[in-house]
């Protein structure tokens, strides 16, 4: 029981983001994910073309 009580006490000390901050942070995360996905897609496509050229297909 002491553990649960300590968890609740620690959770009261957490600084939670406001709704506006949460939306901003979510947008940053989603934007970063999209950029990384596009970058990896382009690299994968380029590697596929290079591999096909290398093996002569």
Image (cartoon, rainbow, N blue to C red):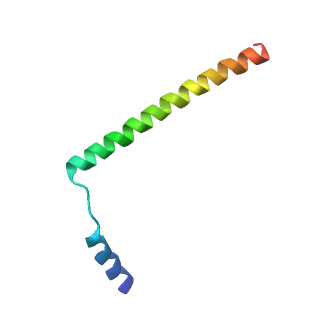
Q: Give the x, y percent position of residue 35.
A: 44, 32
Residue 41 position within the rendered picture, expressed as x and y whole percent measured from the top left: 54, 27
Q: Residue at x 27, y 71 (%)?
A: 13
Residue 23 lies, with reference to residue 10, above or below; the image says above
Is 39 situated above or below 22?
above
Quadrant in which the N terminus is drawn: bottom left
Q: Residue at x 36, y 86 (%)?
A: 2
Question: x%, y% of residue 51?
Answer: 72, 21
Number of dots carrying numbers? 0
Evaluate whether residue 1 shows in this view.
no
Residue at 66% in and 18% down: 49
18 lies above or below 57: below
Outermost residue on the bottom side: it is 2
Whether residue 27 is visible here, answered yes or no, is yes
Q: Quadrant of the C terminus?
A: top right
What residue is at 25 percent from the left and 56 percent from the top? 17
Left or right: residue 4 versus residue 18 is: right
42 left or right of 49 in image: left
- Rendered image quadrant of residue 43: top right
Q: Is residue 18 above or below residue 8?
A: above
The residue sitting at the right extreme is 55
């Amino acid at each position: 029981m002491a553990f649960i009580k300590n968890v609740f006490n620690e959770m009261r000390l957490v600084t939670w983001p406001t709704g506006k901050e949460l939306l901003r942070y979510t947008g940053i995360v989603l934007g970063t994910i999209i950029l990384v996905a596009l970058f990896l897609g382009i690299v994968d496509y380029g590697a596929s073309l290079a591999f096909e050229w290398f093996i002569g297909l």
